[in-house]
Image (cartoon, rainbow, N blue to C red):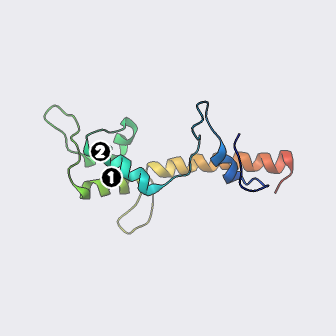
Amino acid sequence: MGSFKYPFISVTDLIHSLRGRKTEYAFPIFRSDEYWEEKFKLYKNGIYDSYELQFIGKLLKKDASGNYLPVDNQETLNKIRDRIEGKLSNGTRKGGLWKQQGECGNLVHDVFSRFYRDTIGIK
């Protein structure tokens, strides 16, 4: 299942230790700067995830055939990041792809919390 630094297990530690069949982490610790560095490289080369296009498609330019063009300026990259993170112009967050994913993560956390509390008796 995973290894832990301390003799107790918190729900968050448990979730971050879970691995898939090929030993990759099922829920890796997220590092925003590294994530966006890699994503921006893809966008600059015109490589987009079809799911993300639902959120960012209107920010991208298309060629005559309707294909999305690579992003060629930092302002558009920043707008893409803000749209996916759900940032508004006043700095608050609302909606966006990550809000949906965060809600799913909260449900997973709740399931493990209930398991610990109800089955093992850990509070």
Number of the front mark, 1 or 2: 2
Q: Please, what secondary structure does the residue beneath circle 1 have? A: helix
Left or right: residue 7 compared with residue 85: right
The quadrant holding residue 22 is top right
Q: Please, what secondary structure does the residue beneath circle 2 have? A: helix
Residue of label 1: 80
Which residue appears farthest toward the left when viewing the image?
Answer: 64
Amino acid under disc 2 = Tyr
Q: Residues within 10 Å of mark 2 (few under 14, many from 20)?
A: many
The residue at the point 45 percent across, 56 percent down is: 32
Which residue appears farthest toward the bottom when viewing the image?
Answer: 90
Q: Are marks 1 and 2 in contact (CB under 8 Å)?
A: yes
Mark positioned earlier in the residue sequence (1 or 2): 2
The residue at the point 38 percent across, 69 percent down is: 90
Look at the picture and state if 32 lies above or below 108: below
Amino acid under disc 1 = Ile
List x then y, in percent, for residue 25.
58, 41
Look at the picture and state if 65 lies above or below 10: above
List x then y, in percent, for residue 46.
26, 40
The residue at the point 81 percent across, 51 percent down is: 117
Viewer-side residue, 110 vs 11? 11
List x then y, in percent, for residue 69.
21, 40
List x then y, in percent, for residue 27.
58, 44
Residue of label 2: 43
The residue at the point 75 percent across, 53 percent down is: 9
Which residue appears farthest toward the right when viewing the image?
Answer: 121
Alpha-carbon span between mark 1 and mark 2: 10 Å
Left or right: residue 102 compared with residue 84: right
Quarter of the picture containing the N terminus is top right
The image's mark for residue 71 is: none
